[in-house]
Image (cartoon, grey):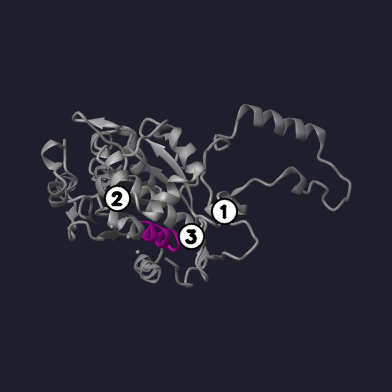
Amino acid sequence: MDAGASAPGDQQANMVDLDAEADPWAAHEPAEAEDLDFGMGMEDATPDKAVEEEEEEVAEKEPDPMADIPWDVAPDKQVGEQQHAAKEGAVKFCGKVLLVLTNTKEAAGKPTGFDPLQCARVYQALTHHGFSVMWASPEGGLVTADASVAAGAAEDECLASWNADAGVAEALKSTVKLEDVDPSYCILDAVLFLGGRGALYDFVSHDEVRRIAREMWEQSKVVAALDRGSVALAGVILEDGNALVEGKEVTGASNDEEDAVGDSAGLPVTVEEALEEAGAGYKKGLDFEPNVAVTGRLITGQNTASAKVVADAIVGVVSNPDDANVWAQFVAVSA
């Protein structure tokens, strides 16, 4: 639901200056054949043919499941500085975030979908700091933006820039199906469940939504949600039998905000009630004003106005997971 918070401090050890020439993803990328040194000091030596054939045979049997993962790389590499010009003194981090959108495009006889303004603000904030994103959805494939949100934010520059990004447009036509995502293999640092009215219909009870949230949490990764997307967290049960949100401070779309936009009567569930029923301590802020709850690696935002703060908090926690207060420091200098 609908409002916005940009350049971090220099206390994080893994920051890379934007002006640096080095590729921040080099550590995650396999070396090219021409870079491998099989010579053991001999200038013209080549690998043993039997070993080479054995490696090729293994490669054929075990294809790389990451080969076709559609990472949307940082904009300074993909769409150019004209759309996402980095502020002077900004820094680049190494991080990968799974952004999950709803597949629901119609509910209760009304068109719906994901919230494009939230997506635009989160995407801009994450990629500004060098993070890569993967767009996903419960069922994969095409996802639909809520036209009413787009119409109401027609003059928003961030949304206009996001809409003009050809790479994003292509990715939203073929989002990754959640059952095809293995957090232990994808080198994911965080998952963020985004809002939109449609999320209240498929996030609330989808097994793969719960699996992704549970596995990311149990692998010590960041789990985040925004607005109505926070309903994804309500049904997540961990391996020890406890609810993910039990006893934790979290937030998401409030009942008062749902009433204000005239939606509460026709909704299958409200985020506030779902989180409270799961044992969470619901943190309510002012209607349509920024409000974020951070409990360790669990990050939630109440509404669209909280989108950038949530993204900045993700960057802060991923960049220094051992500092419980780093997210607040990071958001403060990004404001």
Percent x, y of residue 33:
74, 43
Give the CA distance from mark 1 to mark 2.
Answer: 28 Å
The quarter of the picture where residue 299 lies is bottom left
* Residue picked out by circle 1: 80
The quarter of the picture where residue 237 lies is top left
Give the CA distance from mark 2 to mark 3.
Answer: 19 Å
Left or right of 60, for residue 260: left
Q: Nearer the viewer, residue 79 or 321?
A: 79
As for residue 317 lying within the magenta part, the answer is yes
Q: Secondary structure at mark 1?
A: loop
Q: What's the amino acid at mark 2?
A: Leu
* Residue picked out by circle 2: 226
Task: Pick whichever of labels 2 and 3 is earlier in the sequence.
Answer: 3
Percent x, y of residue 267:
16, 37
> Measuring 35% from the left and 45% from the top, which residue is drawn there?
116
Q: Secondary structure at mark 3?
A: loop
> Measuring 29% from the left and 60% from the top, which residue is drawn there?
294
Q: What's the amino acid at mark 3?
A: His
Task: Pick whichever of labels 3 and 1 is earlier in the sequence.
Answer: 1
* Residue picked out by circle 3: 129
| Picture layout, residue 54 above or below residue 116 | above
Q: Which residues are magenta?
A: 311-321
> Measuring 44% from the left and 63% from the top, which residue is drawn there?
320
